[in-house]
Image (tube, helix red, strand yellow):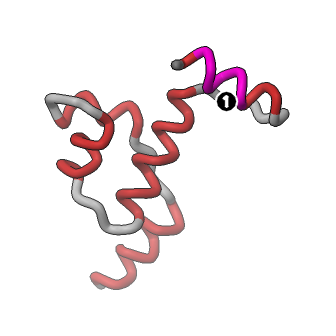
């Protein structure tokens, strides 16, 4: 499966892998309000800790959330 996804990226001229797609999906889900447990289940992980490498922080979103609180 990983090789097929990498091949699709390559044919589309995009540098990426199945892991970059999983990272993007996890980050997008969180930014849209999904819980970390939902993301864990969709990634097929048993422990939430296994999701951490797939998550990224959107600095603009972080600033926006911070300014909403203060």
Q: Residue at x 40, y 47 (%)?
A: 26
Look at the picture and state if 27 lies above or below 59: above
Tell me if 4 is positioned left or right of 9 in this view: left
- In the picture, the quarter occupied by the C terminus is bottom left
Tell me if 30 is positioned left or right of 25 in this view: left
Q: Residue at x 82, y 28 (%)?
A: 11
Percent of width and height locating residue 38: 22, 51
Look at the picture and state if 63 lies above or below 15: below
Percent of width and height locating residue 22: 47, 37
Q: Residues within 10 Å of mark 1 (few under 14, many from 20)?
A: some
Does 6 lie within the magenta span?
A: yes
- Residue 8, quarter of picture: top right
- Magenta segment, principal secondary structure? helix
- Residue 44, quarter of picture: top left
Per the image, the residue denoted by label 1 is 16
Does 4 lie within the magenta span?
A: yes
């Amino acid at each position: 499966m990983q090789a097929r996804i990498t091949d699709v990226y390559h044919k589309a001229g995009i540098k990426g892998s199945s892991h970059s797609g999983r990272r993007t999906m996890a980050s997008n889900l969180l930014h849209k309000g999904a819980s970390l447990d939902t993301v864990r289940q969709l990634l097929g992980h048993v422990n939430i800790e296994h999701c951490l490498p797939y998550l990224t922080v959107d600095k603009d979103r972080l600033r926006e959330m911070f300014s909403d609180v203060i």
